[in-house]
Each structure stands twice: as C-alpha cells, then as structure tokens.
Image (cartoon, grey):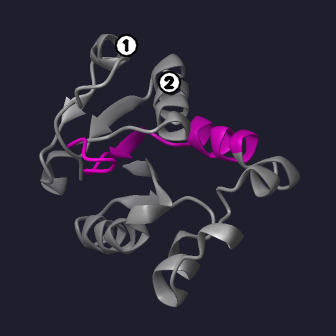
Amino acid sequence: MNIVICGSMQFCKEMVAAKIEMENLGCFVLLPKHTEEFAKNGRNDNESSESIKNKIEQDLIREYFEEIKKCDAVLIFNMEKKNIPGYVGGNTFLEMGFGHVLNKKVYLLNDIPEVSYKDEIIAMQPIVINGDFKKIC
C-alpha cells in the first residue's frame, strides 16, 4: 500500500514516527516536503515550507496533488490544534478532497473534528483509524 500523509508541519515529528511505524508494517509512505528536515532540525514558522511564499514559489499544492494521484490512499494526520481535537486545517482539507475526488481511500488518524466543514468531511466517508496503523498496512 502506498500512503501519502497529509497534515500540519506542527506535527512533523509525529508524522516521521508514523512513517517509520507504517514502513515497518509494509507500507510505502510519503511525507510532505521538508517534514523530515523540520523534524530533525526544528521548525521555524518564518522559514516553513508551508508559508504562502513557499507554497507559491515551490508550487507545493500542485506538487502534492501529483503525489496523491500516484498513491493508493491518503492518511489525514488530524491531531489537536487550536484547541480542536482532530483538527483538519485548510491545506489538509484540500488534500483530503483531492484524495476523495481521485477515488483514493481516505483515512483519518483521529475522529472527525467539530469544525464548520464537518459535513463535508463526513461526506468523504473517511476511515477513522484512531492511531492504529495496522488498519491501513
């Protein structure tokens, strides 16, 4: 199974750990650009690959869309952020939508968050794994 992980760079260390665990279970895992670098060196929001400038200059949204097209599934790394359990931010929601439209399996790490676009997340029929990567790999 080829999995693309989508999520906030705030969780770069957790995403790297998940990648290792999932690879040990036999999956091929792709992380967002710079995730491993941020996890190793620390993340500086002013230099983040998710900054508006870098999203435009490096065409990161289209680049990750191309990776999602090649995968079997997307794992939405939705952890607590902004005091919202299972938060799914704008960019991650977009990537989740790409996966859905491309008929990829969509997995959520944690339960669907209480956000204004919860109905749209439910309509994509994601599989909630509650942190159990064996449900994917």
Q: Secondary structure at mark 2?
A: helix
Q: Nearer the viewer, residue 116 or 133?
A: 116
Q: Outermost residue, front direction? A: 83
Residue picked out by circle 1: 120
Please check the rendered image and state whether residue 72 is part of the magenta-colored stretch, yes or no.
yes
Q: Quadrant of residue 32?
A: bottom right
Judge left or right: residue 31 versus residue 28: right
Residue at position x 55%, y 27% from top?
A: 98
Return the residue nearer the eye: 108 or 24: 108
Does the magenta segment cover residue 86? Answer: no
Q: Residue at x 69, y 56 (%)?
A: 51
Identify the amino acid type marked 2: Gly
Give the crowd class for mark 2: few <14, some 14-19, many >=20 residues within 10 Å: some
| Magenta-highlighted residues | 61-85
Query: What residue would you read off at disc 2?
Result: 97
Q: Mark 2 to mark 1: distance in Å? A: 9 Å
Residue 137 image position (x, y, % from top left): 24, 53
Q: Which mark is residue 95?
A: none
Q: Position of residue 1 (x, y in %)?
A: 36, 49
Q: Residue at x 22, y 65 (%)?
A: 25
Q: Nearer the viewer, residue 72 or 128?
A: 128
Residue type at mark 1 is Glu
**In the displayed structure image, the side of residue 122 where residue 129 appears, left or right:** left
User: Are discs 2 and 1 less than 8 Å apart at CB?
Assistant: yes
Give residue 109's position: percent from left, percent from top.
23, 46
Helix, strand or loop under label 1: helix
